[in-house]
Image (cartoon, helix red, strand yellow):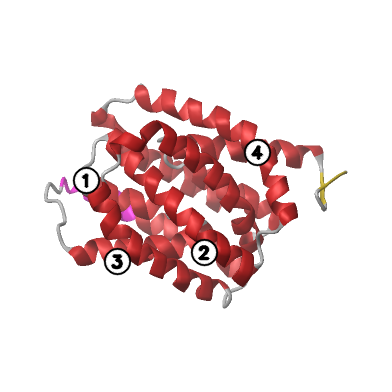
Amino acid sequence: MIDLFGYSLEFQDLMILLLIGLLIGMAKTGVHGAGMIAVPLLAILFGGKNSTGLMLPVLSFADVFGVWYYHRHAKWEHLRKLLPSAVIGVAMGTYLGNLIDDHLFRQLMASIIFVSLGIMVWMERSKRGKIPTSKWFAYSMGILGGVTTMVGNLAGTVMALYLLSMRLPKNEFVGTAAWFFLIINLIKVPFHVIAWKTITLNSFLLDTITIPGVAVGAFLGIIIVKKISEKYYRWFIILMTAIASIFMII
């Protein structure tokens, strides 16, 4: 047993933390779905609600890498539509998180993934070519993204649904998502510190252990995405989401 920043951890727990950093780093540079494997891993170690606070700084570390590499590809017209309603969603998620217990937290995480996955597969199989232009579609996706990112750090599927529907090329997809999550994750910090008290100095110091894994994962993600053609990237996103969903249920 290792005592570290007020946490009693086994050696394998430290290895899992590094793996979580690796997966989050990959997710933030385009390997969608890798982050959803990391979410249940951290929930197993620390519990559903507490894990969201531990995960947030790790996500923010990785967001910096994603924005650094893909910032020039971001489509700000989509961000301007999504961010205001996403902030409302964060506030709603903060309230919701105080009403449900740890077990229900995990069930909600799994439900979010499977519903989003089903919609994405349906969109691809039906070969819908029309891009949704309604502002209400963007607003509803923003609110849902805000709620899911606050409740379980699982807004990746919601954003994937929105950005896939916008038919963005892979670099614009990753760049827009990178900026969205960097901004919204920084907005979430005071909610975790003040309302939920799931981020403390000790939890933040523990998160710094993941930085080497985040860095390696971010560069692996860049390499992997470069090797995937535009034609197959959309199905790659859906496949990674499916794998992550199965992993969570197991």
- Distance from the alpha carbon under mark 1 to that under mark 3: 23 Å
* CA distance separating discs 4 and 2: 22 Å
Secondary structure character of the magenta stretch overall: helix
Residue receiving disc 1: 125
- Horizontal and vertical percent position of residue 151: 52, 64
For the point 51% across and 44% down, the residue is 35
Q: Position of residue 49 (x, y in %)?
A: 62, 63
Residue pointed to by mark 3:
140
Of residues 245 and 205, which is closer to you in this image?
Answer: 205
Q: Residues within 10 Å of mark 3 (few under 14, many from 20)?
A: some
- Identify the mark at residue 210; answer none if there is no mark: 4
Q: Secondary structure at mark 1?
A: helix
User: Hey, what amino acid is under mark 3?
Assistant: Ser
Residue bearing mark 2: 151
Asked if the residue under mark 4 is in contact with the one under mark 1, i.e. CB atoms within 8 Å, the reply is no
Give the mark, 3 or 2, whose residue is nearer the N terminus: 3
* Magenta-highlighted residues: 117-127
| Disc 1 versus disc 4: nearer the observer | 4
Residue found at x 19% / y 64%: 135
Identify the residue shown where x is 36% and y is 45%. 177
Amino acid type, label 4: Thr
